[in-house]
Amino acid sequence: MTHDLKILPEYFHAVCTGDKPFEVRQNDRPYQCGDLLKLNEWTPDAGYTGNSTHVEVTYILSDPAYVKDGFVIMGLNTAP
């Protein structure tokens, strides 16, 4: 499954360079390992920039001992 998501420029660029191999998201979708995230760069002022990247979800952490309730941390492979 592919999830189409907005992402702010500073986080978009960090994912693209490999500096941020994870994504923290509200757990409002059926995220699973092996899913693809289509991350679309977006700014509050201008909207979508036209830049996007695809990453694969390799790990999901949802344990409330480590993650705020209702959120997940997903490990990413930036070269799916």
Image (tube, helix red, strand yellow):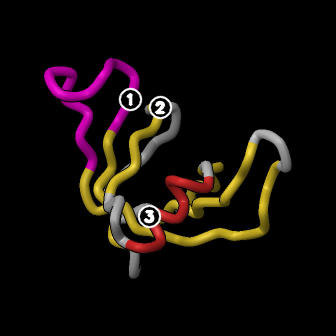
Q: Quadrant of the C terminus?
A: bottom left
Cα–Cα span, label 2 and label 3: 18 Å
Magenta span covers which residues?
60-72
Q: Residues within 10 Å of mark 3 (few under 14, many from 20)?
A: many
> What secondary structure is marked by label 1?
strand
Question: Which mark is on residue 9?
Answer: none
Q: Which residue lies furthest to the top in this view?
A: 69
The reply to whether the C-beta atoms of the residues labelled 1 and 2 are less than 8 Å apart is yes
- Considering only order in the chain, which callout, 3 or 1, is on the residue closer to the N terminus? 3
Q: Residues within 10 Å of mark 1 (few under 14, many from 20)?
A: some
Question: Which mark is on residue 71?
Answer: 1
Q: Residues within 10 Å of mark 2 (few under 14, many from 20)?
A: few
Label 1 is placed on what type of residue?
A: Phe
Label 3 is placed on what type of residue?
A: Val
Magenta run includes residue 62: yes
Residue toward you, 46 or 69: 46
Main SS of the magenta segment?
A: loop
Find residue 43 and report its horizontal and vertical position in percent: 73, 47
Identify whether 43 is placed above or below 71. Answer: below
For this view, does 43 lie left or right of residue 38?
right
Cα–Cα span, label 1 and label 3: 19 Å
Label 2 is placed on what type of residue?
A: Gln
Q: What's the residue at 46%, 42% (across, down)?
A: 30
Q: What's the residue at 40%, 41% (across, down)?
A: 24
Residue where numbered disc 3 is placed: 15
Residue where numbered disc 2 is placed: 26
Q: What's the residue at 54%, 60% (across, down)?
A: 12
